[in-house]
Image: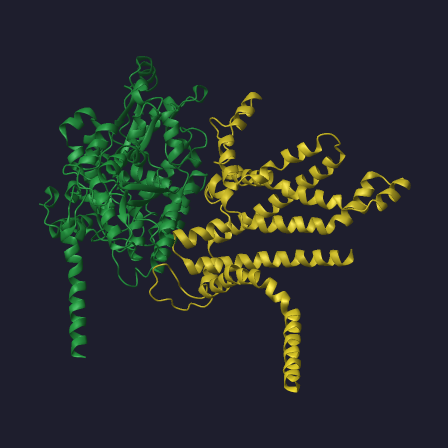
Chain colours: A green, B yellow
Amino acid sequence: MKRFKTLLLVMLAAALCLPLVGAQDVQLTDPATGARPFEGQELRILNTEVVPILAYQHQIVDPLYEEASGVTLIYENAAHSDVLPRIQTTCAAGGDDFDIMFVEDGWAGALAALGCLEELDRFYLAAPGDSHPEDFTTRAFGTVAMAKEKWVGIPTLVAVGMFAYRTDLFNDPDEQAAFMEAYGRDLAVPQTWGELAEVGAFFTRPDEDLYGFNYRYGTPNNILFDYMIHFGFSRGVDFFDADFNPLFDTEAAIDTASFFAGQDVLNLQPPGRESFQFGEVMQNFTQGKVAMYGTESWAIPLLLDSEASLVAENTGFAPIPGWLNPETGEIQSALLSAGPAYMINAHIPEERKWLAWDYLQLAHGVEFSRILADQTGAGHRISVLTDPDLVAKWPHLTANYEAAKVGIGRPAEPWWPEAENAIGRALQEVAAGGDAASLMADANNDIREIVADAGYYDEGITYVSVQQREEFVCAKLADLGLEHDECM
Amino acid sequence: MTATGATGRADQSFSTRLYRATQRYKHWFFIAPALLIILTVVIYPIIFSTGVSFFRVTFASQSRPFVGLQNFERMLTNDDFIESTFNTLYYVVFSVSGSFALGFGVALLIRRITVGKDLLRLILIIPITMAPIVVGLMWNWMLDPLFGLINWFLDLVNIPEQTFLAQAATARMTVVLVDIWQWYPLVFLIIEAGMATLPRAPYESARLEGVSSWMIFRRITLPLLRPVILVALLLRTVDAFRTFDLVRVMTDGGPALTTETLSLYLYRTAFTFNKLSRAAAGSILMLLVIGLISAVMFRYLFREVGDS
């Protein structure tokens, strides 16, 4: 019996030490030394390529990783709206169908609650590679890469609001003269909602197959995003107060809905606008059918790709228009910061987790991100957004950096997809001619019910504010032994 | 010798009994595989879903408290559930009647054609050979307001461009029309097959007595075809009730929930919103409605078959 106990203790000690031994022995792919510890293996990634930057990553960065590592990447690309159901069902069943998954910031809470997401601290501490989690703005990292206080992902992109416009139209002397005659001021990229409507009306010429601008109204997720990114935040709209009371029935929220989804603004957009999703709005701009396009930074590579866009050479970027506060006379602007991260499936075997980490730290690390930014003009790491050479080549990176520093994230609670659907539906109904006040009030009540259902009011759970998210990030970076200027 | 004879009789008796038992129960042997599959993939999930609908279950549930009929109550008072139920009924009524009318009409017309009948039949059934997702994507492109084929034709006759799928007023009917386009060949094939089996004698007698074509159709063709018609209607009704893929691809339930069918709504409730038990309650309600309609149709069907 005594020998058995001793044997048991030895086995237990060995089991406890094994991960440490494994961790210390871990070697990552390193193009500099030629290390290829995972050569010959396959890495399975559940992805969606609905946003262009992911397709460009796939084309530019992935071959570099495959060449450096000898690993074969196998992608399963699903429609954007199918990814969350796919992950939820697979994860709930403890499935290991994929090693890495595309996770939007708003989904992280639901997936963390399911125990699907592998925390990354131990990988970083054992073998940081080129991951550099301190190379993101704290707001972006807190929104995209973390589930509350847990670090679970490496951002594949950080989406911030951008305003694309046709430089050929705005710089055309005839257009400028015509605008001056019509409105008594210079034709310029709009800085306020009012100017947006005015310039949009000027360029709306159905006979010429040209319209003012376009936004996404087609799915609850899309319409809510454009509502908040381009209009809501600047008007002072927020998702919840500190006690998790939804704020979609406020005067600001209703005014914003009336403007964004009202007929006056809809009429300045190409026909079919009520059903526009990611693809249609991009296509309208790249085919030269709209003069302006309220978008996000993920669209940049495609908009600048002359093989994909007829107006690539004539595309300029500017900050998104803000709201002119009638009381102060100031232009208020605020931005949403969002985006997906690649996260490691917690249900895969340990050795595959290290393979997944190997991919994340290198393919989405500092060096490869720089290559991607250099070739496409899209970047989300501080080192890229502030690189003098890259900024000289792609001036919009500075605006991206400023936006990434102040961007506000959407909630990432387990029930958020349902709440997003409720408010998105209400906005769609406003676009279909419904009364904004009553629809937003109904949606607000629906969301309150969803929050109540989740037990948040009974349990006194409070809303994670922007400041709290930043605190989570700073605490996490400190745990990892890292410093960040924004945490000083 | 005697002992051997007794054993032989016993063996004979055993083998006889075995043979008789095998004969008596052999049908179970043959239907067992199918029965097993049905039990596993149909009956068990229904029982499981029914059970889940009385609890509060999510993917992340640690505890699964019993909530009685609460999920059913929440579903029946949920605006989105009610609207998607209405959408589904609209879809069923117009899609089934439309595809039936078109399929029946085509079946009647093709009987009169003598040349190129086989080729025409082949062309007519093309829509049913296509996957609903392909059909949805194809029509999405054709209906596109800026570069779609339909609007190009409308433009030729000076009709302004139409945004069929973007307007609440037209999206629902547009999806129904595409569904009719895809599924009328099913009705056509069933009705045509039924017509091929009709006896000639009643028609010959009617013609000899100078009965009009309309009266022949009304008094002979329709009554004789009634069981076939009921089968076609039953198949189309059940199929229309569970429509998912076509709507998902064409509108994803929009604009503003006007095309969201029950299947799509329940899918979202379960797999996107993580409300498994509520979705289970909704699916049970849906099953009851389909079951009720099917039962009524089956009753008519078997009565007709019995009469005939």
Depth check, front residue: B213 or A343 = A343
Decide: is A464 above or below A65: below
Please provide percent x and percent y for residue B158: 56, 21
Q: Is residue B293 left or right of residue A144?
A: right
Residue lying furthest right: B209
Would you say residue A368 is visible in this rendering? yes
Q: Position of residue A482 (x, y in %)?
A: 10, 47
- Residue farthest toward the front in the current orientation of the protein: B1
Nearer to us in this view, A172 or B212: B212
How many numbered circles are shown? 0
Q: Quadrant of the N terminus of chain A?
A: bottom left
Position of B178 relative to A7 (above/below):
above
Residue A175 percent coordinates (x, y): 33, 16
Front in this rendered view, residue B64 or A218? B64
Q: Residue at x 18, y 67 (%)?
A: A11
* B202 up-or-down from B22: above or below: above
